[in-house]
């Protein structure tokens, strides 16, 4: 897959990468990209990133009807890859080096939204954060920090 010229990469391209690069079981999560932010606004606090949705499915639930931590961690990891697309303004091969998840509350019978932001993008490493919230109440579900090696 070729990397487009800077400034040409947008949400349609990110959606295409989501459908082409990830393992089939990740595709089974039926994730959607709802926002893609790669254009600086001049705001000192701005960070490139993306907003993704994990639709609720009973197949993702553990005993008791809550969405499993494994599904939420895979969702956060995938969201950070898409955020890295925004930071790089195109596809770049990468691999997860570290991911730390702090679960704050269980989520049941609700889609989950991920707001993934690249905090720092270097030549060989990327560092980011993801906030997971319940789509029905916008309450925090988990906070995730991660590091990626840029290949």
Image (spheres, rainbow, N blue to C red):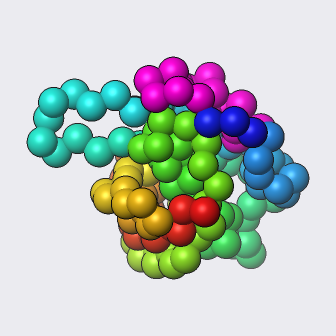
Q: Position of residue 111 (x, y in %)?
A: 59, 45
For this rendering, which residue is in front, 9 or 32?
9
User: Could you tell whether 62 is left or right of 112 in the image?
Assistant: right
Q: Residue at x 62, y 23 (%)?
A: 12
Residue 118 is inside the magenta segment: no
Q: Quadrant of residue 52?
A: top right
Marks counted in the figure total 0
Q: Residue at x 62, y 36 (%)?
A: 3
Q: Residue at x 42, y 60 (%)?
A: 123
User: Could you tell whether 63 is left or right of 6 in the image?
Assistant: right
Q: Residue at x 42, y 76 (%)?
A: 102
Q: Can residue 65 be seen?
A: no
User: Could you tell whether 37 is left or right of 15 in the image?
Assistant: left
Q: Position of residue 113 (x, y in %)?
A: 50, 46
Q: Which residues are magenta?
A: 4-19
Q: Quadrant of the N terminus?
A: top right
User: Could you tell whether 50 is left or right of 94 in the image?
Assistant: left
Q: Is residue 131 above or below residue 88?
A: below
Q: Can residue 1 be seen?
A: yes
Q: Position of residue 133 (x, y in %)?
A: 43, 52
Q: Is residue 66 above or below residue 81?
A: below
Residue 5 is inside the magenta segment: yes
Q: Quadrant of the C terminus?
A: bottom right
* Residue with the most extreme left position: 44
Q: Is residue 38 above or below residue 115?
A: above
Q: Quadrant of residue 19?
A: top right
For this rendering, which residue is in front, 63 or 49?
49
């Amino acid at each position: 897959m070729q990397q487009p010229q800077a400034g040409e990469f947008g949400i349609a391209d990110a959606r295409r990468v989501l459908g082409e690069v990830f393992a089939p079981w990740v595709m089974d999560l039926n994730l959607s990209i709802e926002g893609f932010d790669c254009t600086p606004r001049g705001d000192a606090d701005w960070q490139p990133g993306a907003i993704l949705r994990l639709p609720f499915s009973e197949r993702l639930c553990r005993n008791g009807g809550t969405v499993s931590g494994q599904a939420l961690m895979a969702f956060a990891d995938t969201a950070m890859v898409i955020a890295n697309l925004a930071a790089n303004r195109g596809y770049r091969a990468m691999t997860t080096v570290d991911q730390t998840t702090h679960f704050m509350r269980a989520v049941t019978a609700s889609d989950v939204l991920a707001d993934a932001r690249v905090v720092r993008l270097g030549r060989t490493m990327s560092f980011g954060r993801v906030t997971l919230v319940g789509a029905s109440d916008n309450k925090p579900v988990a906070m995730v920090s991660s590091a990626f090696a840029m290949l």
